[in-house]
Image: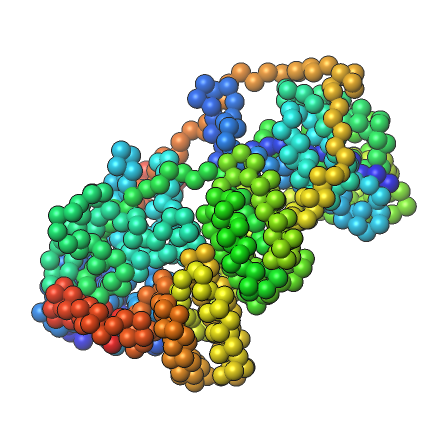
Amino acid sequence: MEERIDTLPRLPVSTDTGDLEHYGRDWTRFWKPAPCGVVFPESTDDVAELVGWARKTKTPLVPSGGRTGLSGGAVASRNELVVSLERMRSLVELDEADASITVQAGMTIGEVQRRAVDAGFCYPVDWAAAESSQAGGSIATNAGGIRVLRYGMTRDWVRGLEVVTGAGEVLELNRGLIKNNAGYDLRQLFIGSEGTLGFITRATFGLAPPPVQQSVLLLGFADLEAIMPAFALLRRQLSLSAFEFFDQASLEHVATHTGQSSPIETECPFYAVVEFDDPDGSAQERALEVFEGAVEEGWVTDGIISQSESQVQELWQWREAISEAIAVHTPYKNDLSVRISRVPTFLAELDRLVEAKYPEFQVVWFGHIGDGNLHMNVLKPESWSVEDFHTACNGLSEQVFELVRKHEGSLSAEHGVGLLKRDHLAMCRSESEIELMRRIKQAFDPDNLINPGKILP
Amino acid sequence: MKILVTLKRVVDYNVRVRVKSDGSGVETDGVKMSINPFDEIALEEALRIKERGDAEEVVVASIGAADVQQQLRTGLAMGADRALHVETESAPQPLTAARILLKLVEREEPGIVFLGKQAIDDDCNQTGQMLAALWDRPQATFASKVELSDGKASVTREVDAGLETIQVDLPAVLTSDLRLNEPRFVKLPEIMKAKRKPLDIIALDELGIEDAVDHQISDFQPPPKRAGGKILESAGELVDELKNKGLL
């Protein structure tokens, strides 16, 4: 392999042990990173040349962005060559008339958001890891995040892509057009492809007008059944941009992690961060009425409301810091979605299932309940080894996915399939669907060299 | 003992301030307005003193147009007992503000007047000191810790050389520094209760104060734009660049 790397075309390469580990994995910790090297292309031509070289030398490539993924999509554990896009992070163009921004794939989403704000716009797709995750990776994973309720997923904002396919061809997909019904929209295939069809090298995103002032409620719920009717009420009365829930365990983990005490006095089984438009402060009055109504119904037991921008950010921390706070417990993540109306029943059944099977596992629940999307995090008890824990969780997943199937949901709402869910894909996709996916993969990546072994079993 | 806390309505700390195109002031239309963060810290401290049993009543006061009542209501929801709104359409400068506050002090006879060390809009850092002089009472400014006993306040101040602890006889003027405490969140049930708490509106002439403007601001300019950075290819280039600029 070393020799092969020596034949690489004049690109910066690293085979440093630390780099191999760093670039060989994402935020999952179940696979040992073992790439043969990391290469840093600086242009689309570099990437195309690299793919040509990989085809000649039969070297599997793993496209690599900010590696904040949670399904192992960017893991290189089988001697692949990692292709990091991090040096391709320039702004190509920001067009005010088109309300769009074109960037190289390695620019972080945080930077995309700042560039948009500087020009008087906003890139509204947002999640906790925005400062690390990159444009290309966010598209390859069709990232969702905390404001899907109002703004949709990454897919809704991608206007154009430049890609290098597994065959080494450079394609311009959709060229930033809003309307384009001339044939199949290949751009859509790359969105959510988890790097299995080729490399995204450049992207054009649509931009939204800047949001009006937002206020945030932190509500404590009486029980699981109370969340959905309260959500329905809030959605009718306020212009919601986010409705994010988490359980008491999440709150405790964040409190331990950040050293802060709970902002809310009453201990409740579930909480929600509710963000809404409040352009002139008058929506707070309406929020208060809704709160009173929800208290009378017995749904909500306590709540606080932001009085300043810093409080908006502080309250969001209780939701956004959860992933980081539980990371030390090697969480096994399931990212499930069902129709919104089915969430409470589904969640209750899941809770009973884990409780019966592994009473010693702690399950931490949070997620985008307003989108029907639940993040189920099973924490590793300290006495368990990572391997045993992973095996147990895999077994547990079979039954979790049975429930998903029963409730006609998806086993990956936004995290993707990667390595983590690959062998379970058939639980929510039909055989014919999977076969078509295989053929699409083959059409773009004839030698099966681009992120092989991901998504498809 | 009664504590009087001042609350100034300012552009929210996290909002990027924009100068109006005609240079007449700062854009406030559609901009989030909040309690001056140092005043919020002062109120939090006053509430903690009351909760410890060292004070019986916390009164919040603000000077300005009708919209300052929004911040007073927030203060009431945080836990203040009463609110005073001194109504004026102009924005009083520190000396006028101190004169107005003195009138409130004469009416209310508080043991402590607690202000923020400065307001984040004009950064004057004068009102507390001026009030102490007009009132002829001690002042303990930049407080990072406050302890009360036997009619005295022991106040730790953040000074350039470190921390300094002074003792003042009450009544006195105290001003809060950033690290004094972390203000609480407003609970929704408390907002409902706050609606029933008294909020008195006082006209400026009722206090016998003329809305004197002691200075006028003729122009506002945004800070000059920073020049962009430069990415160099090598350490050698960096050394050359630094030498060229006379920095090495």
Measuring 59% from the left and 64% from the top, which residue is drawn there? A223
Total numbered badges shown on the rendered structure: 0
Q: Is residue A302 above or below residue B109?
A: below
* Residue A288 visible at all: yes
Q: How far from the left and from the top, in percent, is residue B107?
A: 84, 27
Instruction: Tell me the quarter of the picture where residue B97 sits.
Output: top right
Which of the pair B169/B160 is nearer the observer?
B169
Q: How far from the left and from the top, in percent, is residue B111?
A: 85, 37
* Residue B76 visible at all: no
Q: How far from the left and from the top, in percent, is residue A294?
A: 60, 52
Check the image and name the residue furthest to the right.
Answer: B150
Instruction: Tell me the quarter of the picture where residue A215 sits.
Output: top right
Q: Is residue B9 above or below residue A401?
A: above
Q: Quadrant of the C terminus of chain B?
A: top left
Instruction: Tell me the quarter of the picture where residue A116 sits.
Output: top left
Task: Tell me which colouring the rendered structure shows.
Answer: rainbow
Q: Quadrant of the N terminus of chain B?
A: top right
Which of the pair B190/A23 is nearer the observer?
B190
Measuring 40% from the left and 83% from the top, which residue is drawn there? A395
Which of the pair A429/B146 is nearer the observer?
A429
Left or right position of A160 against B99: left
Which of the pair B141/B246 is nearer the observer?
B141
Left or right position of A450 against A379: left
Measuring 52% from the left and 22% from the top, which residue is drawn there? B25
Check the image and name the residue furthest to the left.
Answer: A56
Q: Is residue A336 above or below residue A97?
A: below
Q: How far from the left and from the top, in percent, is residue A347?
A: 48, 69
Measuring 22% from the left and 74% from the top, which residue is drawn there? A431
Left or right position of A341 against A433: right
Q: Is residue B191 above or below residue B219?
A: below
